[in-house]
C-alpha cells in the first residue's frame, strides 16, 4: 500500500511538472459490472452475483507530452449495486442456508494513463493504464433463510425461518481493489479551449470488490463529458 501511494505521488509530480498544453475534464455515466464467480466456492448452481446498472462520476487532468501523446490522472467516484443470492445445502434435502442480499456501496478510484490522440476538430483517442480504488461506504439489506426438514402428518416438509439483514457492506466488501483499464472515444473540439467527448472504457479487476464469492470482475463504463484545454501561452501567464 505504501509503495502504491509513493508511485501515485511520483506520477502526479511528473504530470504537474511538465510544460505544455494541458486540460481538465469532467465525466459522468454508467457502469455495468460483470462478476465471474469463484468455481471453488461451495455454491449450488442457483447461486448468483448480479450487478445492476450503476453510476460513475470523474474528473481528470491531462498534460501534452508530444504531438499525439498525453499523460492523464483521473479521480472517479464509482457506485455499485449488487444482488447476491447463495444457496448452500449443508445436508442435501435436510438442511439449507440461503442468503438473499442487496448491496449498495461506493469506491474512489485513481487511474493513471497515457493517451494517444488522432485528428483535429473531431478527435479519436485511445488510453490504457492502471488504477487503484478504496472503499468509501455502503450498506447491505436482505434476508438470511434457514431451512430444515420436518416430519408432518402428510410426510416430510421443509420449514424455513427468515431473518432480516441490515448492516454495512464493508463486512463483505474489500477495502482496496486494483486492476487495468482500457478506453477509447471521440472528442469534438467546439473552440480552442472547449471540447466534448463520448468515452467507452473497460476494466479488468483481478482483485474484485467482493471478499469471497467472485474470482474476478469486468466493468464496462460508458460516459460523456467536457474538457477545458489550457494552451501553452496560458500556462506561462498563470506562472507569471
Image: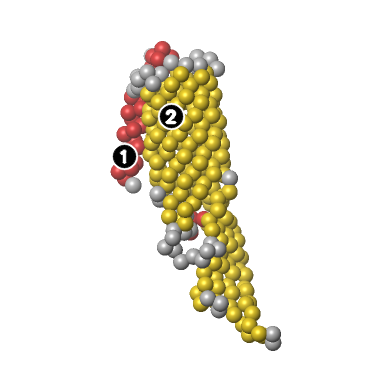
In the image, what residue occupies the spot 46% across and 18% down? 119
Mark before the other along the chain sequence, 2 or 1: 1
- Could you say where residue 36 lies in the image, as x and y percent from the top left? 47, 53
Which residue in the protein does label 2 denote? 126
Q: Is residue 111 above or below residue 103?
A: above
Query: Which disc, if any, is residue 225?
Result: none
Of the pair 224 and 25, the residue shown nearer to us: 224
Q: Is residue 233 above or below residue 112?
A: above
Q: Residue furthest front?
A: 45
- Could you say where residue 13 lies in the image, as x and y percent from the top left? 33, 30
In the image, what residue occupies the spot 60% across and 61% down? 142
Q: Is residue 47 above or below residue 134?
A: below
In the image, what residue occupies the spot 47% across and 46% down? 218
Q: Residues within 10 Å of mark 2 (few under 14, many from 20)?
A: some
Of the pair 166 and 100, the residue shown nearer to us: 100
Query: Which disc, if any, is residue 6?
Result: 1
Report how far apart the C-alphas of labels 2 and 1 lie in the structure: 26 Å
- Could you say where residue 144 lies in the image, as x and y percent from the top left? 58, 67
Give the side of residue 17 with respect to residue 23, left or right.
left
In the image, what residue occupies the spot 51% across and 66% down? 44
Give the side of residue 163 with respect to residue 128, left or right.
right
Q: Secondary structure at mark 2?
A: strand
> Which quarter of the picture shows residue 232?
top left
The answer to whether marks 2 and 1 mark residues whose Cβ atoms lie closer than 8 Å is no
> Which quarter of the picture shows residue 112?
top left
Is residue 149 among the parts visible in the rendering? Answer: yes
Q: Secondary structure at mark 1?
A: helix
Amino acid at each position: 500500500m505504501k509503495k502504491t501511494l509513493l508511485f501515485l505521488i511520483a506520477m502526479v509530480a511528473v504530470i504537474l511538472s511538465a510544460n505544455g498544453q494541458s486540460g481538465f475534464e469532467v465525466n459522468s455515466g454508467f457502469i455495468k459490472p460483470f462478476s465471474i464467480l469463484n468455481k471453488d466456492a461451495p455454491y449450488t448452481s442457483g447461486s448468483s452475483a448480479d450487478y445492476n446498472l450503476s453510476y460513475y462520476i470523474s474528473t481528470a487532468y491531462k498534460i501534452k507530452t508530444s504531438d499525439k501523446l498525453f499523460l492523464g490522472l483521473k479521480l472517479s467516484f464509482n457506485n455499485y449495486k449488487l444482488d447476491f443470492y447463495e444457496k448452500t445445502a449443508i445436508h442435501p434435502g435436510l438442511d439449507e442456508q440461503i442468503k438473499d442480499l442487496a448491496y449498495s456501496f461506493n469506491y474512489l478510484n485513481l487511474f493513471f494513463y497515457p493517451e494517444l490522440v488522432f485528428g483535429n476538430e473531431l478527435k479519436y483517442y485511445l488510453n490504457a493504464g492502471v488504477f487503484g480504488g478504496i472503499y468509501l461506504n455502503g450498506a447491505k439489506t436482505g434476508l438470511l433463510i434457514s431451512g430444515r426438514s420436518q416430519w408432518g402428518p402428510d410426510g416430510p416438509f421443509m420449514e424455513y425461518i427468515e431473518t432480516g439483514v441490515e448492516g454495512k457492506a464493508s463486512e463483505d466488501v474489500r477495502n482496496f481493489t486494483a486492476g487495468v483499464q482500457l478506453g477509447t472515444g471521440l472528442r469534438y473540439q467546439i473552440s480552442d479551449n472547449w471540447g466534448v467527448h463520448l468515452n467507452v472504457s473497460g476494466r479488468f479487476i483481478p482483485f474484485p470488490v467482493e471478499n469471497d464469492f467472485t474470482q474476478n470482475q469486468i466493468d464496462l463504463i460508458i460516459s460523456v463529458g467536457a474538457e477545458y484545454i489550457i494552451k501553452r501561452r496560458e500556462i506561462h501567464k498563470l506562472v507569471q
